[in-house]
């Protein structure tokens, strides 16, 4: 019973952290503001997450768990499921905003999420290359290798999220992603 309550409290804290980071970014978020949102003191929050960095890592891991079910390894991705993931993300603007804010901040020197994102991108590129290889073999119809196309696929997914967050009325994130997948599937044109 106590363990279930502890897990429930951790989930509440993570939801509050997502909200605060989405509103203020990581650097602007404080443990006190997260604690206040869930009705704890800062000291009470530290019982669950002893540092701001520990809370950040938990937020990032939870976001990946929601998106991928923890399947970030090569061989676990499929293009048809990526299309569903983009569609699902379009229904969760707060989560996408939190991820995007942390990703943008993580490129600055000394940011505690930098290592997480560096490792995550290497893993995601590997997983996407595996998915592309499973569908197309060693060369996509346009002539790219799965590794070359994986870099572009990640860039399109994240770039679409930023554009969609800035102008959701003008950017159809799921539709644009489907357009990109269709482009990957087109045979190379020779003059």
Image (tube, rainbow, N blue to C red):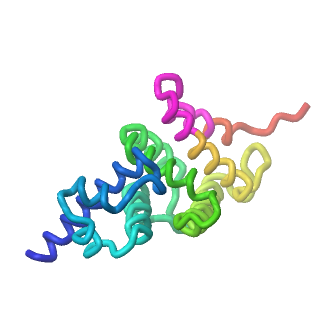
Between residues 88 and 20, which one lies in front from this camera angle?
A: 20
Q: Quadrant of the N terminus?
A: bottom left
Q: Quadrant of residue 31?
A: bottom left
Between residues 139 and 98, which one lies in front from this camera angle?
A: 98
Numbered marks: total: 0
Q: Is residue 56 visible?
A: yes
Q: Looking at the image, is 182 positioned above or below residue 99? A: above
**171 drawn magenta:** yes
Where does the image place residue 52, in percent across and percent down from the top left? 40, 67
Q: Looking at the image, is 163 positioned above or below residue 60? A: above
Q: Quadrant of the C terminus?
A: top right
Q: Quadrant of residue 3?
A: bottom left
Left or right: residue 86 versus residue 163 is left
Left or right: residue 47 versus residue 50 is left
Q: Quadrant of residue 47?
A: bottom left
Q: Residue at x 41, y 51 (%)?
A: 21
Q: Main secondary structure of the magenta part?
A: helix
Q: Which residue lies most toward the left here?
A: 1
Q: Is residue 75 visible?
A: no
Q: Which residue lies most toward the right here?
A: 191
Q: Looking at the image, is 173 positioned above or below residue 19? A: above
Read off the magenta span: 160-180
Q: Residue at x 57, y 58 (%)?
A: 106
**101 drawn magenta:** no
């Amino acid at each position: 019973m106590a363990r279930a309550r502890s897990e429930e409290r951790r989930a509440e804290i993570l939801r509050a952290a997502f909200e605060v980071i989405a509103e203020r970014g990581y650097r602007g978020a404080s443990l006190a503001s997260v604690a206040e949102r869930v009705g704890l003191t800062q000291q009470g929050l530290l019982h669950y997450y002893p540092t701001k960095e520990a809370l950040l890592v938990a937020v990032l891991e939870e976001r990946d768990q929601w998106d991928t079910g923890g399947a970030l390894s090569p061989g676990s991705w499929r293009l048809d499921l990526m299309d569903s993931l983009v569609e699902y993300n379009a229904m969760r603007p707060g989560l996408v905003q939190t991820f995007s804010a942390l990703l943008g901040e993580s490129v600055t020197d000394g940011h505690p999420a930098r290592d997480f994102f560096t490792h995550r991108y290497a893993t995601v590129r590997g997983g996407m290359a595996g998915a592309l290889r499973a569908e197309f073999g060693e060369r996509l119809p346009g002539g790219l290798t799965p590794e070359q196309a994986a870099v572009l696929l990640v860039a399109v997914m994240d770039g679409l999220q930023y554009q969609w967050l800035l102008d959701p009325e003008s950017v159809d994130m799921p539709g644009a992603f489907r357009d990109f997948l269709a482009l990957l599937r087109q045979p190379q044109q020779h003059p």
